[in-house]
Amino acid sequence: MKNPALGGRDLAAALVVVLVWGVNFVVMKFALRDFSPFQLGAARFVFAVLPLALFVKPPRIPWHWVLLYGAFQGVGQFGLVFLALKVGMTAALASVLLQTQVFFTALFGFVLLHERASRPLQAGLLLAALGLACFALNYVGPAGGASSLLGFALTLCAAAMWALSNIVARRVQLLHTDYSPMAFVVWSSAVAVIPFMALSLAFDPQALRWQWLQARASSWLAVAYLGWVATLVGYGLWTSLLKRHPANRVAPFSLGVPVIGLAAGMLVLDERITPWQWAGTALVVAALACVMLGGLVKRR
């Protein structure tokens, strides 16, 4: 039996998610004008937790899974992304490089879960490696382009943290099939708040420690977008799509996220992409397409 295509309403929902997540990185840049990376992390997760924690009960799974997911996805992924954007990574390239989490997930799955890589995934890993080599070559020579080498490294570390959170989520799905994904996301978000506050107190300069009290209204709107729109609306719509359609019908839409991210960064922030970065972007997107569409084409 063939999988049914997405209807008009579900297609619109998928496109909304792509748009919401694609402009997410530009919004982060705006928020970082008035918040330090650690302050933004704390504020983002406070906004994500507060509306739902009052109504959503904790997930019925051991708490160590909630703590691990909150540490990897919350503090690890977003903390490193915010740091990367602060020290020189452009919003446009961050939207592309973070998608390498697909390949880090495959590598961690092989090492930790003994999962075998399919042929499309193997081809995708090779293309992604070539793409990362192009990004690295961008920093060889006197001109490194618009992004910094440190920002590049931090973004890849953020992608690795995202991948580790994927491994945790897979283990939870295998061991606790009746758990609530929404409750899992909400309460794991709560885990990240206190560590971000502690990191801010420990590492933010004294002069910047309370700068968020004078943050512009536009920066607070950016935080609200990150906590409510990108998290609650984005993940809510994405989860509902995965419940109604096979993953191979839904996952390819995520290919649009780096495209929107690139366009938003260039149009809104006037970010510049070097030839090596364009080559790396093309190879990473091709690698993602190979992984997400390769299995579907093979089955047909």
Image: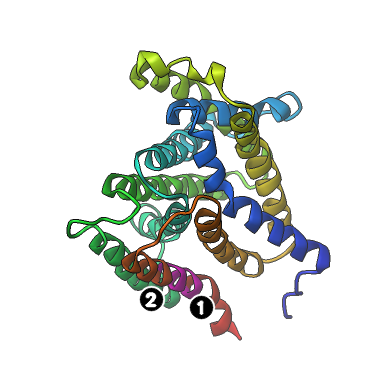
Q: Name the quadrant containing residue 244.
A: bottom right
Residue 32 vs residue 237, the one in the foreground: 32
| Residue at image mark 1 | 294
Badge 1, how many Cα within 10 Å: few under 14, some, many 20+? some
Give the residues in magenta: 284-290
Q: Main secondary structure of the magenta part?
A: helix
Task: For mark 1, give the secondary structure.
Answer: helix
| Residue at image mark 2 | 123
Instruction: Give left or right: position of 27 versus 196.
Output: right
Instruction: Give left or right: position of 141 versus 86.
Output: left
Residue 121 vs residue 61, the one in the foreground: 121
Q: Residue furthest bottom?
A: 300
Q: Amino acid at mark 2?
A: Ala
Task: For mark 2, give the secondary structure.
Answer: helix
Q: Is residue 288 magenta?
A: yes
- Alpha carbon of mark 2 to alpha carbon of mark 1: how far? 9 Å
Q: Residue at x 38, y 47 (%)?
A: 89
Q: Amino acid at mark 1?
A: Gly
Q: Residue at x 37, y 54 (%)?
A: 108
